[in-house]
Image (tube, rainbow, N blue to C red):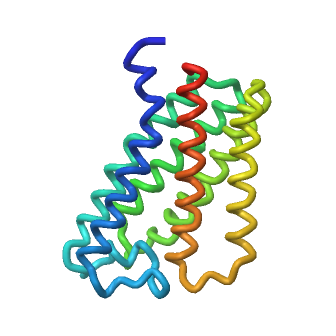
Amino acid sequence: MSQSWSLLRFSGIIAIIIGWVTIFLAAFLHPWFLLEKNALSDLGALNVPDNHIFNFGLMLSSIPIFLYGLYLAKNLNKLGCTGGVFLVIASVSLFLIGLYPEGTYPHLFVSVEFFVSVLVASLIISLSLLTLGFKKHGLSGLILIWTCIILALTVPWPSIGTLEVEVLLFITIWLIVMLHYHLTTGK
């Protein structure tokens, strides 16, 4: 594997760091934002001052997710390749969330598509690791994502924003599991 391809295994973590910095910076700049009442997309809604910070940050974070999806599609088995493709789809959806902010027609669709695609991708990739014999990483990923889905569907979340943060926290932990997989296997 070439050096440039092997560096892409870190792009998932880079993407989530960019995402969290974007969310925290946008929330800091908008003191009216309350996680218990708002969706994260409210930070980038039309007519919100400095909405470009949130929207551009999402678009920027979609690039390393796209690259990470390609890396996984190239370096895992067929099942993992499918998961990588779902991650690429999630990255395109995330880019479109920034391009079509809250208050525009396709925003709701691409937002839902992002969260569904990233969860499906992480489930498939975790299952792929399990089938490849990486039981610790695969099982950890499956437990994390199924726990996330069960909580998302059963907890009465006070706002869409709290639900979004719940999913993002689980995806962050899953990406840390994936980083551990890459570092311990060299793959």
Q: Residue 106, percent across and down?
A: 45, 68
Farthest top residue? 1
Judge left or right: residue 89 versus residue 17. Answer: right
Q: Is residue 78 left or right of residue 107?
A: right
* Quadrant of res 74: top right
Using residue 30 as the reference point, say whether residue 162 is left or right of it.
right
Q: How many marks?
A: 0
Residue under the point 73% across and 28% down: 134
Q: Position of residue 17 (x, y in %)?
A: 38, 50
Is 151 on the left or on the right of 27, as rendered? right
| Residue 36 rendering spot, x and y as whole percentages | 49, 85
Q: Quadrant of residue 85?
A: top right
Q: Is residue 148 above or below residue 2?
A: below
Tell me which residue sits at (64%, 46%) in the image: 122
Q: Residue at x 70, y 78 (%)?
A: 155
Q: Quadrant of the C terminus?
A: top right
Q: Quick one: 173 or 5, which is closer to the camera?
A: 173
Q: Does 30 appear above or below 131?
A: below
**Residue 38 occupies quadrant:** bottom left
User: Residue at coordinates 74% horizontally, 47% vertically from top-left?
Assistant: 142
Q: Position of residue 50 (x, y in %)?
A: 20, 72
